[in-house]
Amino acid sequence: MIKIAILSDVHGNSIALDAVLADIATLGNIDAYWLLGDLVAMGPDPVGVMKRLKALPNSRAVRGNTDRWLTDVHTEFPLTPAEISRGAQNNESAPLELAYSMAWTQGALTGSGDLAWIANLPLEYRTALPDGTRVLCVHAAPGQDDGYGIRPTMSDAEVATAIADANADLIFVGHTHWALDRTVNGARVVNLGSVSLQVLPDLRASYVLLEADEAGYQLEIRKVDYDHGVVISQLVAQKHPALDTIRGFLSGQRRPFWEQ
């Protein structure tokens, strides 16, 4: 029997990551870690998160949209300066804070020497379980690190369209911060939820434990409490450029902008 811990959307939150890693430690020996992107941006401790993730044994990671943005904020970030300025004029804080946060995180990772690791992350990871189950790990959806993703509000037909070219039996995604476990046309799709910036009403960190052997596999979406107030205090002390946006997520006062 092998055990694999699968995490996504850490978003530079080492407090949440430490809570998840502590929970994983209670489960006994873990044979591998799969990391599904959006690992460091939009949080107070991108360097600390990188240190923890790079120390994980037998880990495989793929890129998320914010990881890709960090590699070149000028060309990869989805909003133009004009759009950011227009949002600021309309009192839309999230786009402006998101842009500032990307530059802030890029600078932190440049200083720590970790930006190259992020820049080299692949779009997807494929493998097979001991029973032959074909696995695909990707951030948003097969072939995509961004976009609408796969979320519980989608119909089976919409999910089927999203995974039509996956060529996999078991598909793990993140991106939407909204956990899901659904089987469509014989393929099982599992959205891990997120380690940080969780979607209401459940603000706990979320990850998946996968256990597999020659007879088959089983998985569990696990939820872990952590102290959101400590993270907010870190952001305040730093005068973090995305303080208001992230504090709104962590305190449950607003839904993430991609769910509005």
Image (cartoon, grey):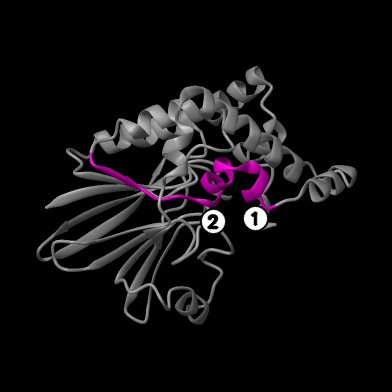
Q: Which residue is mark 2?
A: 176
Seen at 50% across and 45% down, the residue is 38
Write down the region rendered in magenta: 58-78
User: x, y (%) of residue 184?
Assistant: 39, 78
Q: Which kind of residue does numbered mark 2 sit on?
A: Thr
Q: Left or right of 86: which side holds 150?
A: left
Instruction: Say the numbered circle drawn on residue 237.
Output: none
From this view, report whether residue 225 is shown above or below residue 190: above
Seen at 45% across and 34% down, the residue is 16
Instruction: Place residue 245 in its image quadrant.
Output: top right
Instruction: Place residue 231 in its image quadrant.
Output: top right
User: x, y (%) of residue 236?
Assistant: 66, 22
User: x, y (%) of residue 71?
Assistant: 54, 42
Tag 2 or tag 1, which sits nearer the N-term?
2
Q: Which kind of residue does numbered mark 1 sit on?
A: Trp
Q: Which residue is mark 1?
A: 258
Question: Is residue 67 magenta-colored?
Answer: yes
Marks 1 & 2, CB-CB < 8 Å contact: yes
From this view, report whether residue 58 is shown above or below residue 177: above
Q: Left or right of 130: which side holds 168?
A: right
Determine the residue located farthest toward the top in the rendered image: 237
Work out whether residue 225 can be spotted: no
Seen at 72% across and 38% down, the residue is 97
Work out whether residue 159 can be spotted: yes
Q: Left or right of 2: which side holds 66?
A: right
